[in-house]
Amino acid sequence: MLTHEVLVIGGGLAGLMAALAASEEAEVAVLSKLWPTRSHSGAAQGGFNSALGEDDSVEAHIFDTVKGGDYLGDQDAIEVLCSEGPEVIMELERMGVPWTRTEDGRVAQRSLGGAGFPRACFAADFSGHVVLHTLYEQVFRRGVKIYPEWHLLKLLVEDGRVAGVLAYDLARASLEVMRAKVVILATGGYGRVFSKTTNAHANTGDGMAIAYRAGAVLSDMEFVQFHPTTLYGTNILISEAARGEGGYLRNASGERFMKRYAPQKMELAPRDVVSRAIFKEIKEGRGVAGKYVHLDMTHLGEALINERLPQVRDLAVCYAGVDPVHSPVPIEPAQHYSMGGVRTDSWGVTSLPGLLAAGEVANVSVHGANRLGGNSLLETVVFGRRSGRKAAALARGEVAWPALSPATVKESQEDFLALFGSGGSAQAAAADDILQIRRELTALMTNQVGIFRTGDELSDAVAQIRQLQARYRELKPAFKKCPFNYALTEYLEVGYLLDLSEVIAIGALRRTESRGAHYRLDYPQRDDRHWLCHTFVKKGADGPVFSLHPVTITRHAPQERGY
Ligand SMILES: Cc1cc2nc3c(=O)[nH]c(=O)nc-3n(C[C@H](O)[C@H](O)[C@H](O)COP(=O)(O)OP(=O)(O)OC[C@H]3O[C@@H](n4cnc5c(N)ncnc54)[C@H](O)[C@@H]3O)c2cc1C
């Protein structure tokens, strides 16, 4: 059996930052279903928010984040996020991150939506990529053991405490048991619950679903972010940086329609506001060809686009056949970010002893009902570092290894193998059905649990998800012991998507108000009297069990949110 004092699951920004911090004082390993540098963090373009500018302040960053999240974020956690920002940006710089510079040599910052100041530190539009590679080098230098292309299957819980994991090594097709004093989940988001998403194929919410199954509390799962500008058809992200650098949104008649929705902030209003505006323009017949709107960067000039937005230009040319230097780019909104996740405190501690969580898998909660651009990358490094430090302290404080009985190990292995049948012709049929279930589920979530929601559509979605879950349980694909068995991982991932879809849809149905990214056409107002609270959900014997918990408000009382 493999043993590590601290076991980090996930090799994205949150996981690598946690591993680095933990490795200062404890022995650490990282287990990741992707090679770490292929994590979705590497796709992030826009930047990391941090109040470095002379006119900017941590206080202003806190306020923008609280307001951007429609007052649902916990203000004590937001204070941590914003006040540790400047220091962590400098720490990354010392590790070797080549931030883009101003003429006089300081770290350059750009405007992203909902921010009062240019606040996002960036490296052209490859911000996530460069930081991910820098952290990977550092983790490598420290000699942290990495298990690449190993999948977390289950958290092993003994006497109510996480004592290790059951994992699957894709290349060797083997089940492995790993013991740990502390496990840190950093498995990212669940964007693939939706058919229209900017997220990588691997973002199937595995860690969130596995923690939920093991008894951890998830929170605010009904809050799903839709990004305003993704390429029409493929939903490849066109970073908010494009609007931050001055891009306009125009409808079929060339009008900058944001003046009707957010007259002050215009294109740089928060994402929930801009996504709804675009969706409405298209729905009400003002879209180009009735299908999309235009992101117009033609007035920015080739030099600026090449310097600040080279990836945006490449993506538009390669995937939409449009060069933004000369023509507007067709765009539509799509799912982008999961605000909800495994509930943690500001040190990453979850409701399940022995388990910490950081990054998009976690809900601290700093984003409340709507995340601001640039705050998620900051969250990964700030809370990744804190959870790493906390894990090392916990691991060092534990004299003995937590108990892990042979019976618990055996049961987990048997439960896993019981998912499968004997194969043969049933296997081929099963593979088809898995794909079919996934297609139906993700289309349902996009159509009925998307940007605009209604009670009727949500109840119908919940009923349909339950039918899909029943169909899924009937499937018995074969457990073929062959290397790189992606049919197996696809099957498991659809199971995670189904569990999470159920809690997202029921959470959205229960919340009879509109707040941030959650918009109910039948309850269009924010309702602080009943709903200024977090939704907690735990797995019960007959499905999810929901409860409400107060929001921590320290300095900013809720106000009306205008832009
Ligand atoms: C296209 C795009 C652009 C973005 N741009 C920005 C931006 O400019 N600014 C900003 O603030 N935010 C941005 N975001 C959001 C931000 O990038 C993410 O929220 C953040 O990078 C998530 O980091 P993470 O470490 O939590 O997860 P990820 O980077 O997604 O990493 C998850 C890790 O978990 C591992 N994993 C998953 N499941 C398993 C399993 N079962 N077993 C083992 N390992 C597993 C994966 O291998 C991976 O290494 C963007 C997101 C997207 C999709």
Image: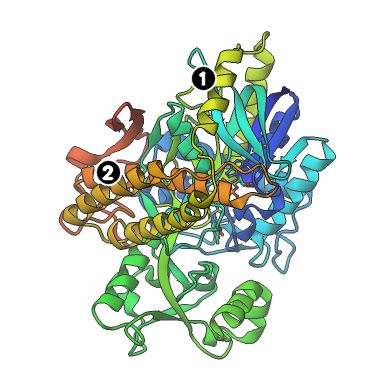
Between 366 and 139, the residue placed more toward the observer is 139
Badge 1 element:
loop
Q: Quadrant of the C terminus?
A: bottom left
Q: Which disc, if any, is residue 223?
A: none
The coloring applied to the image is rainbow
- Position of 380 with respect to 90 (left or right) is left
* Residue for badge 1: 353
- Indicate the position of residue 339 as horizontal and vertical percent values: 42, 47
* Residue for badge 2: 506
Instruction: Please give the name of the residue rendered at 44% of the width and 76% of the height, measured from the top-left corner.
Output: 331
Judge whether residue 364 can be spotted in this image.
no
N-term mark: 2 or 1: 1
Judge whether residue 159 can be spotted in this image.
yes
- Position of 348 with respect to 502 (left or right) is right
Badge 2 element:
helix
- Indicate the position of residue 44 as horizontal and vertical percent values: 59, 59
Relative to 102, does residue 327 appear above or below in the rendering?
below
Instruction: Please give the name of the residue rendered at 70% of the width and 36% of the height, measured from the top-left corner.
Output: 30
Cα distance in 3D space between marks 2 and 1: 27 Å
Q: Residue furthest front?
A: 424
User: For the residue with label 2, is its CB less than 8 Å from the closest atom of ligand 1?
Assistant: no
- Look at label 1 and name its amino acid: Pro
Between 11 and 50, the residue placed more toward the observer is 11
Relative to 70, does residue 47 appear above or below in the rendering?
below
- Look at label 2 and name its amino acid: Ile
- Indicate the position of residue 516 as horizontal and vertical percent values: 32, 53
Please rate how many residues cluster around mark 1, counting C-alpha atoms within 10 Å: few if below 14, some from 14 to 19, many from 20: some
Q: Residue furthest top?
A: 399
Mark 2 or 1, closer to the camera: 2
